[in-house]
Structures are given as structure tokens and as C-alpha cells.
Amino acid sequence: MQRNLVKTKKYRVGKNTFIVIKIFQRAKAKTDEGNALATNQANVKIFKKKIKEKRY
């Protein structure tokens, strides 16, 4: 089984927070006859974290 390697880092500059995502992908194709096409696609979703309300 082939696995992709994903590394994420967060950087903060002033008020802004930047997320850097590095994706190292692998694709493999093998055939005895004819043509083979190896493709690999990455879907990245970034969600904003909700701030929890403080309850007293």
C-alpha cells in the first residue's frame, strides 16, 4: 500500500496565522499489456476553529 506524507506547520506573524502544508505524493502504475496511467490527487480542507465560550 502506498501512503502520502503530509506535514503541516503553523506560523504566526503579528495578528496573522499562516498554515503551510507540504504534501509528498506517490503514484504507481503497472501493466502487462497496453497503457497505464498513474494519478494521485490531494484534497485539502481547512476549517476555522471555533472559540469555546467560557462558562462561569
Image: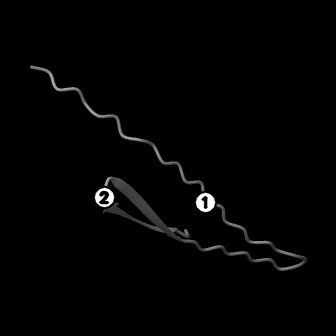
Residue at the spot 48% in from the left edge and 48% down from the top edge? 46
Find residue 27 and report its image quarter.
Answer: bottom right
State the SS at label 1: loop
Number of marks in picture:
2
Against 49, residue 21 (above or below) is below
Point out the residue furthest to the left here: 56
Q: Is residue 36 left or right of residue 52?
A: right
Q: Which of label 2 and label 1 is nearer to you?
A: 2
Point out the residue furthest to the front here: 14
Point out the residue furthest to the right here: 34
Q: Residues within 10 Å of mark 1 (few under 14, many from 20)?
A: few
Q: x, y (%) of residue 39? A: 72, 68
Residue at the spot 41% in from the left edge and 41% down from the top edge? 48
State the SS at label 2: loop
Q: Residues within 10 Å of mark 2 (few under 14, many from 20)?
A: few
Q: x, y (%) of residue 44? A: 55, 54
- The amino acid marked with disc number 1 is Ala
Asked if labels 1 and 2 touch by Cβ distance under 8 angstroms, the answer is no
Residue at the spot 14% in from the left edge and 21% down from the top edge? 55
Q: Is residue 28 left or right of residue 24?
A: right
Find residue 25 and report its image quarter.
Answer: bottom right
Q: x, y (%) of residue 26? A: 60, 74
- Per the model, the C-alpha gap separating discs 2 and 1 is 30 Å
- The amino acid marked with disc number 2 is Gly
Q: Which residue is mark 1?
A: 42
Placement of the C terminus among the 4 image quadrants:
top left
Q: Nearer the viewer, residue 1 or 41?
A: 41
Placement of the N terminus among the 4 image quadrants:
bottom right
Q: Which residue is mark 2?
A: 14
Against 30, residue 44 (above or below) is above
For marks 2 and 1, the one nearer the N-term is 2
